[in-house]
């Protein structure tokens, strides 16, 4: 597991070795860049990397933007462990089928 404190750090870590990541979970609201921006950058490097975007109650990210960006799933906060585990499983299973 790799943890970044903000979008810029996450992007730096990903750029250094994109192949070391099996899945990315990012928050929509972070310092330096949004999760949507980070996802687009990462998908520009690795087109099929599964990305899950977490968002809070007040944040609205239109579904069309999520799909168009290549994000596998939108996860609403507060995130329940079971929901997150099931979403991760689906994203990884979809990756295997692609």
Image (cartoon, rainbow, N blue to C red):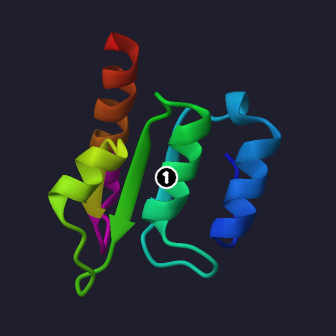
53 w.r.t. 27: above or below: above
Which residue occupies 61% across, 82% down? 31
- The residue tagged 1 is 39
- Seen in the image, is 24 located left or right of residue 71? right
Which residue occupies 24% across, 87% down? 58
Q: Can see residue 83?
A: no
- Seen in the image, is 17 located left or right of residue 22? right
Residue 29, position as x, y percentages in the image = 46, 78
Which residue occupies 39% across, 50% down? 52
84 w.r.t. 56: above or below: above
Residue 38, position as x, y percentages in the image = 55, 59
Residue 36: in magenta span: no
- Seen in the image, is 48 located left or right of residue 71? right
Quarter of the image for the C terminus: give it: top left
Q: Is mark 1 on a helix, strand or loop?
A: helix
Residue 7, position as x, y percentages in the image = 63, 68
- The segment highlighted magenta reads 76-85
Looking at the rendering, which quadrant does residue 50 occupy? top left
Looking at the rendering, which quadrant does residue 81 occupy? bottom left
Residue 4, position as x, y percentages in the image = 70, 63
Query: 21 and 18: which one is in front?
Result: 18
Residue that protrudes farthest toward the top in the picture? 97
Question: Is the residue marked by circle 1 packed among few (<14), some (14-19), or many (20+) residues within 10 Å?
Answer: many
Which residue occupies 35% across, 48% down? 69
Residue that protrudes farthest toward the right in the picture? 16
Q: Can see residue 79?
A: yes
Residue 84: in magenta span: yes
């Amino acid at each position: 597991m790799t943890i970044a404190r903000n979008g810029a750090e996450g992007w730096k870590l990903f750029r250094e070795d994109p192949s070391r990541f099996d899945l990315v979970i990012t928050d929509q609201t972070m310092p330096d860049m949004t999760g949507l921006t980070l996802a687009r950058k990462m998908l520009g490097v690795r087109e099929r990397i599964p990305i899950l975007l977490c968002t809070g109650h007040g944040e609205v990210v239109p579904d069309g933007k999520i799909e168009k960006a290549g994000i596998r799933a939108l996860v609403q906060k507060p995130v329940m462990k079971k929901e997150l585990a099931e979403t991760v499983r689906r994203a990884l299973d979809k990756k295997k089928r692609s």
